[in-house]
Image: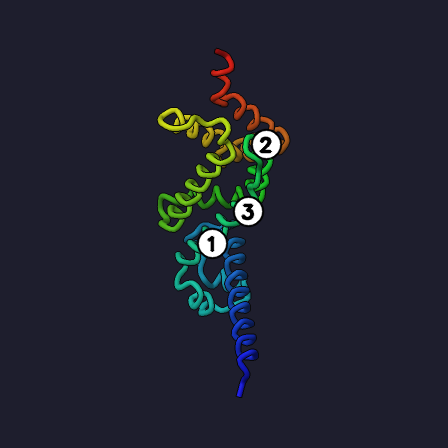
Amino acid sequence: MESEGKRSYRMGARAAALEATRARIVQAAAEVWSQRWHDEVTLQHIAEAAGVSVQTIVNHFGSKDALYDALADAVAAQTGLSRQAPVGDVPGIVAALFADYERQGDANVLWIAQMDRIPAARRAAAHARGLHRAWLERVFADRLPDAGREREHALDLHYAATDIYLWKLWRRDLGLSRADAERAMRDLLDAIDPRRDQHAQ
């Protein structure tokens, strides 16, 4: 008869293996979807990239859209970990944001471009917008008005100044170096600092 210790170890090892497989599938999905449109990708494409069967993906996620949602959650979690910056440290904030955009900005732009016709992409984009706004509230807490319309207005300006499409404009469309693009964003953030008007009075 199997001991309790051996049974617990076996169950723990099985759970770890399942989690590793799940993570491998999500990583493969990220790689495939970073290069192709959502509706061009099949579960077979992802299965081949992950080295598993289509049935394994179905067992873990149920459907392609459910896998897409899981990928969006994983990207959001990774973004939260990578965007660590002290409150009010504009150079640090911009550097953290660019590290994120340089790593997965092109894939994010591709996903956003599909949100009008792909429900899963729309959900992912809405989730990302909420997370980005919450991040802005945290890292710019020292400069945002306390409440009301002025706070919302300031947040809107900071959102526009740090939006991924602005990164795309500078880095991809205009061909700026990363250093020059980061400088442009820092200058823009300094220009919209609500405290400038107070200091000028």
Label 2 packing within 10 angstroms: few (<14), some (14-19), many (20+): few
Q: Name the residue under label 2.
A: 175
Q: Name the residue under label 1.
A: 71
Residue projecting furthest to the top: 201
Tell me which corner region of the image, top left, top right, bottom left or bottom right, holds residue 94. Answer: top right
Residue projecting furthest to the bottom: 1
Vertical position of residue 67 compared to residue 139: above or below: below
Q: Which residue is drawn at 49% across and 22% down?
A: 192
Mark whose residue sits in front, 2 or 1: 1
Kind of residue at disc 1: Leu
> Which is more toward the observer, 101 or 42?
101
Q: Which residue is drawn at 62% across and 33% down?
A: 178
Mark whose residue sits in front, 1 or 3: 3
Vertical position of residue 201 compared to residue 188: above or below: above
User: Residue 110: percent from the left, percent from the top?
Assistant: 47, 44
Q: How many marks?
A: 3
Residue 81 badge: 3
Sequence-wise, which precedes: disc 2 or disc 3? 3
Secondary structure at badge 2 equals loop
> Which is more toward the observer, 1 or 19?
1
Residues under labels 2 and 1: Cα distance? 29 Å
Sequence-wise, which precedes: disc 1 or disc 3? 1
Secondary structure at badge 3 equals helix
Sequence-wise, which precedes: disc 2 or disc 1? 1
Q: Which residue is drawn at 49% across and 20% down?
A: 195
User: Residue 46: percent from the left, percent from the top?
Assistant: 49, 60
Vertical position of residue 107 compared to residue 172: above or below: below
Kind of residue at disc 2: Gly
Kind of residue at disc 3: Leu
Vertical position of residue 98 compared to residue 107: above or below: above
